[in-house]
Image: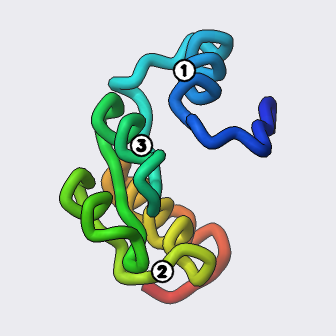
Amino acid sequence: MSWVFQGHIEKFRCSSESWRKSQVKPSEIAYVGDDLTDVVIMKRVVLSFATANARPEVKRSASAITDAPGGAGAIREVVEVLLKARGVWDGLLKKYEVSV
């Protein structure tokens, strides 16, 4: 992890700073959020997810909603979706000798 920002209510400034420093474009970012302060970021990235326990307003702003709530597997769910979309999920299962 290159950056950790704690104690900031406005997440966009911190996020955009880390994007600039890492030379990552918003069109290359998937973001997961659950509260109102996440919406401003969700509207600027290519793919956004709201957790199952997100505020209704946040869910309306997301590209997709996880089945799992935040803190109970939502990030893992998003990672699996992204790995499957990239076509690498089955290879990971084989690597760890998991039956498909």
Which numbered mark, 2 or 3, is in the foreground of this view? 2
The residue labelled by disc 1 is 16
Residue position marked by numbered label 2 in the rendering = 69
In the rendered view of the protein, which quadrant contains the C terminus? bottom left
The residue to which callout 3 is attached is: 30
Q: Position of residue 7 (x, y in %)?
A: 77, 44
Judging depth in this view, the residue of 77 and 36 nearest the camera is 36
Badge 3: few (under 14), some or many (20 or more) residues near its Cα, within 10 Å? some
Q: Secondary structure at mark 1?
A: helix
Residue 83 in percent (x, y) is at 44, 56
- Which amino acid does the dot numbered 2 rest on? Pro
> In terms of sequence position, does the residue under pointer 1 or pointer 3 come before the other?
1
User: Which of the two discs, 2 and 1, labels the residue nearer the N terminus?
Assistant: 1
Vertical relation: 46 (above or below) 81: above
Name which residue type carries label 1: Ser
20 relative to 81 in the view: left or right: right
Residue positioned 31% across, 58% down in the render: 58
Q: Do callouts 2 and 1 mark residues in contact (Cβ within 8 Å)?
A: no
Q: Residues within 10 Å of mark 2 (few under 14, many from 20)?
A: some
Element assignment for label 3: strand
Identify the residue shown where x is 40% and y is 70%: 54
Colour scheme in use = rainbow
Task: Judge left or right: residue 90 versus residue 97.
Answer: left
Asked if 69 appears above or below 33 in the picture, the reply is: below
Q: Residues within 10 Å of mark 1 (few under 14, many from 20)?
A: some
Q: Identify the image quadrant of residue 40.
A: top left
Q: CA distance from mark 1 to mark 3?
A: 14 Å
The nearer-to-camera label among 1 and 3 is 1
3 w.r.t. 48: above or below: above
